[in-house]
Amino acid sequence: MEYRAVCFDMDGVIVDSERHWVPIENERILPAAVPVGDVTASEITGMNVSDQYGYLSERYDVSLGRSEFIELYDAVAEELYTERVALMDGFCALARSLRARARGVALVSSSPQRWIRLVLDRFQLHDAFDQVVSGAAIDGPSKPAPDVYERAVSLLGVAPEQCIAVEDSEHGIEAATSAGMYCVGYRSGGEETQDLSAADAVVNEPGVLDDHLAARLS
């Protein structure tokens, strides 16, 4: 199979935000939204905020309205993406290498466009991607549904089977594989409870990810 494009999730793959989001969700956001209920961040990792609210509302007694829930997340995101997160080791070099091979490169995230823009602005990544797709901006459900990846491959002009996705969550892996893509599960250390076994391959370090993508794209 000739692979022609690579799609990167944002949180936990491009930036180390999951190591910040997980404790914030477990200690601040979820207790405020679901005061009574055994719910943890691992259940919602990879979903966009609106879908998270729908998921929680179907399963738990949620004490916040949808707008309050989204505003709570947004306030945290502003601080997190502008001050606290770091770019994953080696990502800029990897993106340059992929672009030098004339491969399509996309950022495909469940996050709102505003959050994505905060990351692109802070780390000057606007030129790193041919396409940027937000799950909050598509006409359809976000991860774990395949819609966001189907949109990405359409914009890149490739078939799903010609595209590699890099994901760090169960929901993200389900979205990519359901779209017909080869998926690399990337365990970056942010959320160790995620089961990545449904991915076609699992890697644990930036250098190993680089080598794996290079082998597939050669």
Image (cartoon, rainbow, N blue to C red):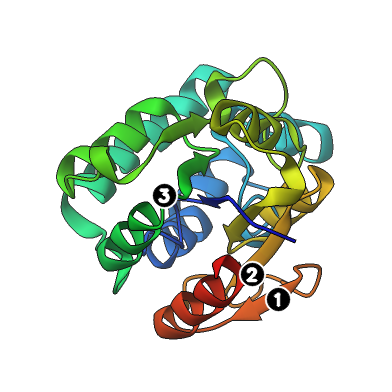
Mark positioned earlier in the residue sequence (3 or 1): 3
Q: Residues within 10 Å of mark 2 (few under 14, many from 20)?
A: many
Looking at the image, which is closer to me, 173 or 33? 173
Looking at the image, which is closer to me, 80 or 184? 184
Q: Which residue is mark 3?
A: 102
Amino acid carrying label 1: it is Ala
Query: Where is 25 relative to 66, above or below?
Result: below
- Residue 152 in percent (x, y) is at 59, 33
Q: Is residue 193 visible?
A: yes
Q: Quadrant of residue 139?
A: top right
Element under label 3? loop
Of circles 1 and 2, which is in front? 1
Q: Residues within 10 Å of mark 3 (few under 14, many from 20)?
A: few
How many marks can you see? 3
- Residue 118 in percent (x, y) is at 25, 37
- Residue 176 in percent (x, y) is at 72, 49
Amino acid carrying label 2: it is Gly
Mark positioned earlier in the residue sequence (3 or 2): 3
Q: Which residue is mark 1?
A: 201
Of circles 3 and 1, which is in front? 3
- Cα separation between marks 3 and 2: 23 Å
Element under label 1? strand
Q: Which residue is mark 2?
A: 185
